[in-house]
Image (cartoon, rainbow, N blue to C red):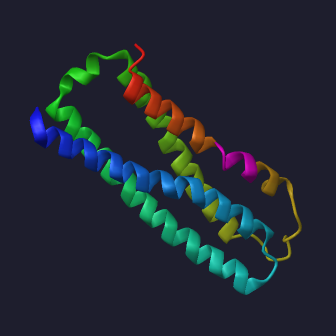
Amino acid sequence: MGTFYLWLKALHIAFMVTWFAGLFYLPRLFIYHRQASDPPGRERFIVMERRLFAIMTIGAVATAGFGVWLLAVNPGLLRSGWFHAKLALLVGLVVYHWRCHVWMTRLKSLNPSENEPSEDARWLRWFNEIPVAFLLGIVILAVVKPF
């Protein structure tokens, strides 16, 4: 496979880092947005969330693209149990990414009079931690290849 494969893998990892940076920070913006009480502050969070979501979506698409390319170069990965588990975690990560979009839409349409702390803020603090589990699982599977 040689050097070309290593370049593909490096680009796959670099874009994965971009994607995860957004996944780690966007839910934190949701918490701040939910707690913002002034209209200009709320508008600022809407813009920040939209821009970050665009960047992390580009990272996700590039990660997937390089991942598919790696798989095309090395189809033997499909015979590995760890790879199937990694793909399952990837599906969960895509669902999480989509849920971020759902939250973004929900917060954008939030009535400004609903600015008191709510269960949303508490849930978002937990939601913010979910990408850590995905990252640990994916990295451990890809590096250790336990099965």
Where residue 130 appears, as percent x and y from the top left, is 63, 42
In this image, 115 relative to 140: left or right? right
Q: Is residue 47 visible?
A: yes
Where residue 49 appears, as percent x and y from the top left, is 57, 69
The magenta stretch spans residue 53: no
Q: Residue furthest right?
A: 116
Query: What span is in magenta?
Result: 124-129
Quadrant where the N terminus is found in the figure: top left
The magenta stretch spans residue 125: yes
| Vertical order, 63 against 114 (above or below) | above
In this image, 140 relative to 47: left or right? left
Q: Quadrant of residue 103?
A: bottom right
Quadrant where the C terminus is found in the figure: top left
| Vertical order, 51 against 135 (above or below) | below
| Vertical order, 22 against 35 (above or below) | above
Q: Residue at x 31, y 17 (%)?
A: 80
Per the picture, the main secondary structure of the magenta-coloured stretch is helix
> What is the number of callouts on the image?
0
Q: Residue furthest top?
A: 147
Relative to the observer, which residue lies in front, 52 or 118? 52
Q: Is residue 65 visible?
A: no
Q: Quadrant of residue 54?
A: bottom left
Q: Residue at x 67, y 60 (%)?
A: 28
In this image, 30 relative to 55: left or right? right
Relative to the observer, which residue lies in front, 1 or 123? 1
Q: Residue at x 18, y 28 (%)?
A: 74
Where residue 84 appears, as percent x and y from the top left, is 38, 22
Where residue 89 appears, as percent x and y from the top left, is 48, 32
Q: Residue at x 42, y 58 (%)?
A: 57
